[in-house]
Image: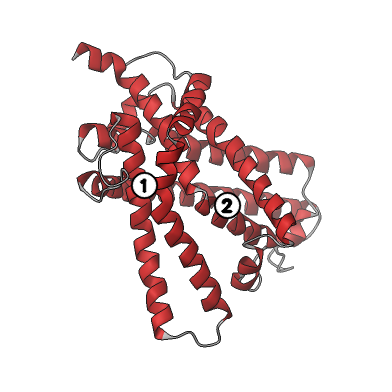
Amino acid sequence: MTTTPVPILRSVAAAYAFLISHWQRALIAAAPYTLLYVAQLFLLANLLTAGAPSEITLSFYWMLWLVTPMALLALTGAMLRMAVKGDYSGRFGLKLGHDEWRIFLVAILVGVLMFVSLVLALMFVIAVMLSVAGGALERAGIDPAAADAEMEMAWGYLSTADWAVLAVVGIAALALVLWLSARVSMAMPATIDKGRVLVLSVWPLTNQTAWRVAAAAALTIGPLLLLEVGVYHLLGAALGERPFQQLELIARVEGDAPVMAQVREYLRWFGLMAGINYPLLTGLYAYIYRNRTENQDQKA
């Protein structure tokens, strides 16, 4: 395993080179997932607007809800085989074999790990927010318990120092999650390469370089997501309404924050763009994986 740092800009360039070189194969491999995803959104809109949906419609929706992730799994496996091994076997590169089920297990294990870390980080941030807000109210002469104060009331009493503390804590929590994400980012390429499920055993691949992996991932996917948001708004301007805006307004829960509704709207759009986003990240992590293991392979 190489001890040299991960080359950030070279990794970003390699990710886009992979996408540009294989965009046709990527779109073909992503076609089943994309069609299923669009059908699922279409049925969801009908279910939300229909007064009493039929049993057939409900059954078909839940069938799509189960099948769509399998198509995404097949896309992920195809892109990983292509990026790690240069293998484009299978019908249009798609399979549902041992590689895909290993990736499925890795995704579950990594997902559980990231979910637990997110919950712990969020609990820590909320605890600090409540403590800072309570202190701000007490400095203003307000007893939070007696006044039955809520967070909305406390915002107006926060000092510059309070906001600085919350910003530092929020950044620290986000940094921890990004660091953990970088540490397990080699799990899928390693699983495809070695032919067995690998998760925590890939940690040594990012020793002393996890932040560079996280930086490479941010510089790779960040500009593309911003471009996709821009395209989404341009499409909305051309159509007179953003494609998923009405769907999110219908699905919005009473009392839900408007910003969260818009986040979910963007996530629906990013889900539609998975045929571009997944191959790009696959190219990135495959390049970093090869970069971290090349010396080890040469010695073997």
The residue drawn where x is 40% and y is 13% is 4
Q: Residues within 10 Å of mark 1 (few under 14, many from 20)?
A: many
Residue 234 place in picture, x, y as percent:
71, 50
Circle 2 is placed at which residue position?
127
Q: Foreground residue, 131 or 6?
A: 6
Which residue sits at x=74%, y=68%? 147
Label 1 sits on what residue type? Leu
Quarter occupied by the N terminus: top left
Which comes before the other along the chain, label 1 or label 2? 1
User: Horizontal placement of 295 versus 273: left or right?
Assistant: left
- Residue 143 can be seen, yes or no: no
Q: Secondary structure at mark 1?
A: helix
> Which of the 4 quarters of the picture holds residue 208?
top left
Tell me: residue 38, above or below residue 78: below
In this picture, residue 140 sits left or right of residue 92: right
Total numbered badges shown on the rendered structure: 2
Q: Position of residue 194 (x, y in %)?
A: 21, 32
Label for residue 75? 1
Which of discs 1 and 2 lies nearer the camera? The answer is 1
Q: Nearer the viewer, residue 288 or 22?
A: 22
Residue 148, position as x, y percentages in the image? 70, 69
Q: Amino acid at mark 2?
A: Ala
Which percent across, then down, holds residue 113?
Answer: 37, 46
Q: Quadrant of residue 137?
A: bottom right
At 52% across and 49% down in the image, what residue appears? 273
Indicate the secondary structure of the residue bearing disc 2.
helix
Q: Residue at x 75, y 51 (%)?
A: 136
* Residue 284 sits above or below residue 199 on the image: above
Residue, far left? 300
Instruction: Give the answer, above or below, for where 210 lies relative to 282.
Output: above
Residue placed most toward the observer, 250 or 56: 56
The alpha-carbon separation of the residues under discs 1 and 2 comes to 40 Å
